[in-house]
Amino acid sequence: MENHFKLLKVLIGIVLIAGMYACNTNSSEERPNKVVVKTTGVTKHSSLLSKSYPAVIQASSDVKLAFRVAGPIINIFVDEGDHVKENQILAQIDPRDYKLQLQATEARYEEVKAEVGRITSLYKKGKVSENDYDKAVSGLKQITAKYNAHKNALSDTKLRAPFSGNINQIFFEADETVDAGMPIVSMIDTQNHEIVTHLPASDYLNKDRFSEFTCRTVDEPDTPLQLKLRNIVSKANLNGLYPAYFNVSNPPKGKILPGMSAEVIIKYKSTGNQLFEIPATSVFKNGDKSTVWVFNEIDKTIHSKQVEIVKIKPSGSAIVKGEITEADTIISAGVHRLKEGQKVEVLKEPSESNVGGLL
């Protein structure tokens, strides 16, 4: 009797378990497969697009200066970091040999000049042939050119600043002998600056749409400087970027220095296509096309529309153009698990008066 009672309990347990399983199966089959999504609107964006690029400030002139004659240096009149004025003497080569050379040439020049003067007087009187006269004039021209060259050589024993600026480097010391053309000092122009940045190929190809240029420095981020585009190098560097050079319009005195980091902002003219701002998370790849899901509020279905990403902002939003309009509602999250024409349920925003959904 006891065994029958145990068997009965086992059978009742099996029946209960089977019933619970059947109920769960039916509930799963009857429960609709709803996907909850988050939506957002589409915002119009100004068609005047701007992009920023890292840049560096450098002196508009950075030159290495050399003597045009050779010889031993007798004086270096400046130190690195010194500010010098235009035409100031920076260094000097021993002028002794050049003075002697000029004195000898000057004496010969005066002699030939006097001789040509005598021959010219006789030629006018018809006492000297035209051939002799031409030879005398030619000789005077030759000695005059030599005389001027030796005067210039003596003058070139003094190295002068071509503009006002700062001495950057000094490569030789006094008593060292240098050849003509060897750099002695380098100078930078501290009054005039240029800013250089590097553009990717896609932006270089759109250079005709450039409309306005500004710059912000690290030390003065809230004070934009107006720039003028000077030129863009048409050949890419080793990194595949195109160097662009800008001049600073009315630079603030003492506020920018060579070597400072900066940011160049370029504004682009409109392409004629309306731009929109949407969350970057709403864009996904459908094949090789950028796409968004647009929500139909009437039948609660979604349909894809193609867009083209113009720019991704640091804030996490994307500037796009394409088939969407300002009236569209798009899916902003979970876009990769959805299908064309699928019905979805929109995630309701929590009420401000019902924090946590407790009511």
Image (tube, rainbow, N blue to C red):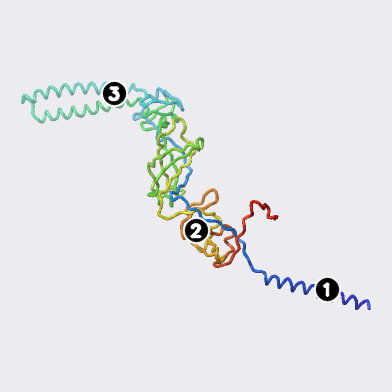
| Residue pointed to by mark 2 | 327
Quadrant of res 86: top left
> Where's residue 277, x and y in %?
50, 53
Closer mark to the observer between disc 3 and disc 2: 2
Q: Earlier in the sequence, mark 3 or mark 2?
A: 3
Say which quadrant the N terminus sits in. Answer: bottom right
- The answer to whether residue 186 is seen in the rendering is no
| Residue pointed to by mark 3 | 101
Mark 3 touches mark 1? (CB < 8 Å): no
> Where's residue 120, x and y in %?
11, 24
Q: Is residue 255 above or below residue 2?
A: above
Q: Is residue 288 above or below residue 206?
A: below
Mark 1 touches mark 2? (CB < 8 Å): no
* Type of amino acid at the residue the image marks with label 2: Ala
- The answer to whether residue 246 is seen in the rendering is yes
| Residue pointed to by mark 1 | 13
Q: How much space separates mark 3 and mark 1, taking CA atoms?
A: 126 Å
**Residue at 6% from the left image edge and 24% from the top image edge:** 125
Q: Is residue 39 left or right of residue 157?
A: right
Q: Is residue 313 left or right of residue 250?
A: right
Q: Earlier in the sequence, mark 1 or mark 2?
A: 1
Closer mark to the observer between disc 3 and disc 1: 1
Quadrant of res 138: top left
**Residue at 43% from the left image edge and 52% from the top image edge:** 202
Characterize the local packing of mark 3: few (<14), some (14-19) or many (20 or more) Cα atoms within 10 angstroms. some
Quadrant of res 128: top left
